[in-house]
Image (spheres, grey):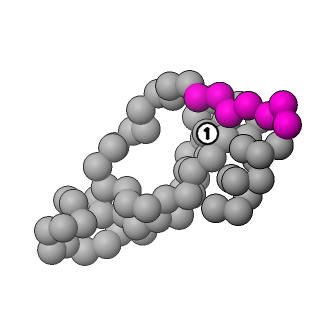
Amino acid sequence: MLSATSLLAAEGSKLTWKALPDLPGKLGVAGPFAGAHNGALIVAGGANFPEGVPWRPTTEGYNSPKVYYD
């Protein structure tokens, strides 16, 4: 929170927002870290529930491959 406050307080800085395309498989990923770097959207970590949603009993999955969308 401190870094966000510092960023907003910096003179001349602006936050810009733009819509990004939907991620594939919207359901099944919970709580990832996300950000943009050099025009790429990076989504990392979080929990994966490929068999359903986190509020219903199921096994948590693990996906080792990394996916990059340009």
Q: Mark 1 falls on what kind of element?
A: strand
Instruction: From the top left corner, tell me how far across and down residue 37 is, in percent.
Output: 73, 41
Instruction: From the top left corner, tell me how far across and down residue 49 is, in percent.
Output: 30, 63
Identify the magenta region.
Answer: 11-17
The prevailing secondary structure element of the residues shown in magenta is loop
| Magenta highlight on residue 10 | no
Q: Which residue is mark 1?
A: 41
Q: Is residue 12 above or below residue 29?
A: above
Residue at (63% x, 46% y) in the render: 35
Residue at (57% x, 51% y) in the render: 34
Residue at (58% x, 29% y) in the render: 17
Split into 4 quadrants, where in the image is the C terminus? top right
Instruction: From the top left corner, tell me how far across and down residue 22 is, in percent.
Output: 41, 32
| Magenta highlight on residue 12 | yes
Which residue is at the front of the view, 13 or 18? 13
Horizontally, residue 50 falls left or right of residue 4, namely left
Split into 4 quadrants, where in the image is the N terminus? bottom right
Q: Is residue 63 visible?
A: no
Residue at (56% x, 46% y) in the render: 67
Horizontally, residue 55 falls left or right of residue 39, namely left
- Where is residue 15, by image quadrant? top right
Horizontally, residue 17 falls left or right of residue 58, namely right
Q: Is residue 32 above or below residue 19?
A: below
Mark 1: amino acid? Leu
